[in-house]
């Protein structure tokens, strides 16, 4: 699992890659702190290189969503593949997030 954060035109984009599971979720939680601290801004999570996400990873995205909502920012999840889309649909997360 890898998270790279870039800023472009005032939007923070987190690029996720690899596998997010129980073993990597703690590391991702640490790497997401800059996004959580700037939750009042526009944030995008690019999943074009994300291969797998477990419930641990979904919880982290939900925590980010809650922080963004509390701080008045915006959150978009983009470029999810069919497998990730299936997970989001089955868990009801598809209705919770702005997915593009």
Image (cartoon, rainbow, N blue to C red):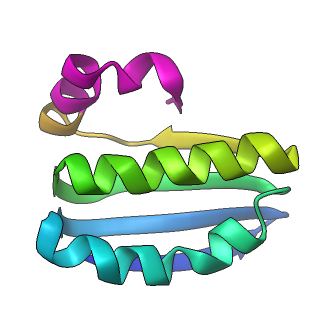
Q: In the image, is 14 to the left or to the right of 75? A: left
Residue 89 picture quarter: top left
Q: In the image, is 17 to the left or to the right of 93? A: left
- How many numbered discs, if any? 0
**Extent of the magenta region:** 85-100
Task: Identify which residue is drawn at 75% across, 40% down.
Answer: 69
Magenta span dominant secondary structure: helix
Residue 79 image position (x, y, % from top left):
38, 42
The quarter in which the N terminus is drawn is bottom left
Task: Identify which residue is drawn at 15% across, 66% down.
Answer: 22
Figure check: 97 above or below 81: above
Q: Examine the structure image and report whether residue 32 is included in the region drawn in magenta.
A: no
Q: Nearer the viewer, residue 82 or 66?
A: 66
Figure check: 19 above or below 89: below
Q: Nearer the viewer, residue 1 or 7?
A: 1
Residue 4 image position (x, y, % from top left):
47, 80
Task: Identify which residue is drawn at 33% across, 18% down.
Answer: 92
Residue 2 image position (x, y, % from top left):
31, 79
Task: Identify which residue is drawn at 13% across, 76% down.
Answer: 23
Q: Nearer the viewer, residue 51 or 96?
A: 96
Q: Examine the structure image and report whether residue 94 is included in the region drawn in magenta.
A: yes
Figure check: 13 above or below 6: above
Q: Nearer the viewer, residue 97 or 63?
A: 63
Residue 77 image position (x, y, % from top left):
49, 42
């Amino acid at each position: 699992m890898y998270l790279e954060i870039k800023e472009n035109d005032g939007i923070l984009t987190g690029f996720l890659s690899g596998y997010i599971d129980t073993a990597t979720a703690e590391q991702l939680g640490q790497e997401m702190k800059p996004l959580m601290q700037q939750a009042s801004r526009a944030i995008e999570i690019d999943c074009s290189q994300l291969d797998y996400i477990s419930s641990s990873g979904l919880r982290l995205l939900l925590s980010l969503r809650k922080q963004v909502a509390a701080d008045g920012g915006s959150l978009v999840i983009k470029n999810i593949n069919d497998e990730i889309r299936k997970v989001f649909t089955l868990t009801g997360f598809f209705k919770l997030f702005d997915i593009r």
